[in-house]
Image (spheres, coloured by chain):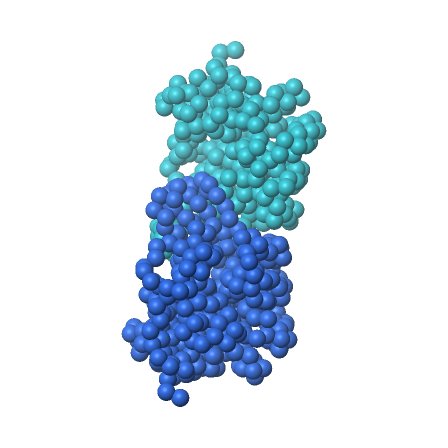
Chain colours: A blue, B cyan
Amino acid sequence: MILTVTLNTALDITYRVRSLRPHASHRVSEVVERPGGKGVNVARVLAALGHEVTVTGFAGGPTGRVLRERLADGMPGERSAVGAGEVVDALVPVFGATRRTIAVVDELTGDTTQLNEPGPQITPAEWALFLGRYTELVAGASAVALCGSLPPGVPVGAYANLVRAARSAGVPVLLDTSGEPLRRGVAARPDIIKPNTDELAELTGSHEPLRATQDARRRGAHAVVASLGADGLLAVTPEGRWRAAPPAPVRGNPTGAGDSAVAGLLSGLVERLPWPARLTRAVALSTATVRSTTAGEFDRTTYEELLSRVAVSGEFSAA
Amino acid sequence: MILTVTLNTALDITYRVRSLRPHASHRVSEVVERPGGKGVNVARVLAALGHEVTVTGFAGGPTGRVLRERLADGMPGERSAVGAGEVVDALVPVFGATRRTIAVVDELTGDTTQLNEPGPQITPAEWALFLGRYTELVAGASAVALCGSLPPGVPVGAYANLVRAARSAGVPVLLDTSGEPLRRGVAARPDIIKPNTDELAELTGSHEPLRATQDARRRGAHAVVASLGADGLLAVTPEGRWRAAPPAPVRGNPTGAGDSAVAGLLSGLVERLPWPARLTRAVALSTATVRSTTAGEFDRTTYEELLSRVAVSGEFSAA
C-alpha cells in the first residue's frame, strides 16, 4: 500500500462562466465537485495506475463529509479504468470544516482563476490523534507521499516530524510542499522532494535550476526532482542526474500536473524501476494531465502514447 | 405570521481576497457563510423588526443541510436585537443540492464580484409537494412574499400559480422576481410588485420609471413599488403615488438592499401603515443595509435615525 498524506484536504469546485469580469455578477453554467488536495490527487492517479493506496490527513464539517462520501463512491472516470486500484479513506475527523477551492474557468479565454480557502483550525489534540494514526499507517506502507500546505494550527515543523517517522520505519518518503514547511522537511532528509522552480528558488535562493537542485540535495534531500513546467523534469539523485521532457510543448490546463508527476515517481519507486523509467512515467503522466479535458485527470491514451516518446538524457553516476 | 417563499434558496458565501485578478490564484483570507436567497433575506429583516416569519421553498444536499442548520441556530447579530422575532423553517426537502453563491470582496477596491450557481433540478413530484405545503402555510399567513429566481424544473408560470392561491385565500401577496416569471406573475394580479428599473424596463419595454410603473399596474399589479437604486422608491398604488428618497446619497454595499425594502413594505402592510409610512420604512431599511459593514444586514442605528429623515413626496388619490 502507498500512503499519501494531505493535511489540508479540499473540496475542489470547478465553475464554468462565460467570461470572468471583476465587479460583475456571473451565472455559473456548470458546477463540478471532487475530492482534492495534493495527496488526494496523487492517490487518484496511483489508483488509476493499479496501486493500492490509502489517504490520510484531516477532514471535517459539511465539506469534509462530501469529500469522504465522494472518496467512498470511488472517483468516477477512473474506477472503471483498466487496472484501477482502490483509494482507502484513513482521514482523521476534525471539528473544523475542510476548505473549498474554487476554480473559475472562463469559457471565452480558457483561463482559470483560483480561489483557495485557508483550511480549518487544527487543535493540538487533533494533531496528536493524527500522529498516532500516521505511525500505524506508515508501518504498513511501501512508500509515503507528504503533500501540500499545512492548515492553521499544524506546527510548521510537521513535515520534518513525518519524514523522520517514515525513515525510522524504513519507508521511503517523498515530500511535496513549499516555504518554511519544505525548508524544515528537507532538513529531516526525505528520500525525494519535487519542487517547482519557484519553490526551489525560495528554498535555495538560486533561480538556476541545476545549481538550486544540487543545493537542495546538500540541504538534506536524497533525490531532488525539479519540475520545470512545460520543459519537463530535472532529477539529481544519488544514482545519477537526468532531464526528462515531453516530445513537444503541450497546451492545456496544468492543474494537477505536478500531482500526477508525484504519482509517477512514487509508483516507479515501489515498482523498483530505474530512475530514467520513473522520470519517463512522471513526465508522461503530467503531460497527459495537462492535455486532459477534465482538470486534474490524465488522459490514458495520451499517457500510453507518451511513454515511448518522452526524451530522457543524463547518466548514472559512476558507482 | 408572514410567509416568505424562496424557491431557489442559497448558501451565501463571502470571500475576502486582497485583489481579484482573472487568471491568478488567490488566497481567501476570510470565509463567511449564511442562509440566503431573497425570501430568506426578507425573513431575516422581518424577524429583526419583531415579526413572526416562516420561510418556505426548497432545500437539499449538503449545502441545504448547512442552510437549515444555520436557520435553526438563529442568524447571529439579529437574534439578540431588541424585538427580534423568530424565523420558522418550513422548507421542503429536495434531492438536489441547494446552490451556493460566492461574493468575492476585493480588499483593495472594495468591489464585489458575484458567482451564482444555478440551483438544483426540481422534480415534478417535489414541485407538487411544495404546492401542498404552500397552500397549508398561506392559510395561516397575514401576508406572503414570493422572492427571487426559479430553480431548474419549476414551471415558468410558478409565481402566477402562487399569486392566485394567495389571493384565493384572501392573503395579500408581494412578488419580487424578474423576466418571464415576473411577466406571468403580474398577470395573476399580485398586490405589490417591487421591480428595479432594469426589471421594470424588461417587463414593460419602457426605461422611463413613471411610465413603466403605470404600465406595470395596467398589466395586473395592484401596486408597483419601483426601486430607483440610490434615488429611493417610486410607488404607484390604488391609494396614490409617492416618491421616497434617503436624505443624502449613501455609499456602501447594495447587496440585500432590495430585500430589506421588501421587508419594510410587507411589515408596513401587515401593520396597516399608510403608504407613505411604509415607503419611509422601506427606504430607511434599504439605506441602512447599504451602510452596514456586513453585506445584507442592516445597521439598526442608521435605520432608526433615517426613519425621521426619509423624504416622501406625492399624494393620496381623490377618493
Give percent across and percent down for residue A147.
49, 68
Which quarter of the picture shows residue A209? Answer: bottom left
Give the tally of numbered discs.
Answer: 0
Furthest residue toward top: B319
Note whether B316 is above or below A216 in the view shown. above
Give percent across and percent down for residue B280.
48, 30
Furthest residue toward bottom: A319
Give percent across and percent down for residue B259.
51, 36
Q: Which quarter of the rendering shows the N terminus of chain B?
A: top right
Going 44% across and 32% down the picture, which residue do you hit? Answer: B310
Going 39% across and 34% down the picture, which residue do you hit? Answer: B230
Q: Is residue A21 visible?
A: no
Q: Closer to the camera, A97 or A317?
A: A317
Going 66% across and 40% down the picture, which residue do you hit? Answer: B93
Q: Is residue B227 visible?
A: yes
Going 45% across and 76% down the picture, which residue do you hit? Answer: A274
Note whether A84 is above or below A185 in the view shown. above
Q: Closer to the camera, A141 or A184?
A: A141
B166 with respect to B278 (left or right): right
Give percent across and percent down for residue B76.
58, 49
Furthest residue toward left: A208
Q: Closer to the camera, A137 or B285?
A: A137
Note whether A92 is above or below B36 in the view shown. below
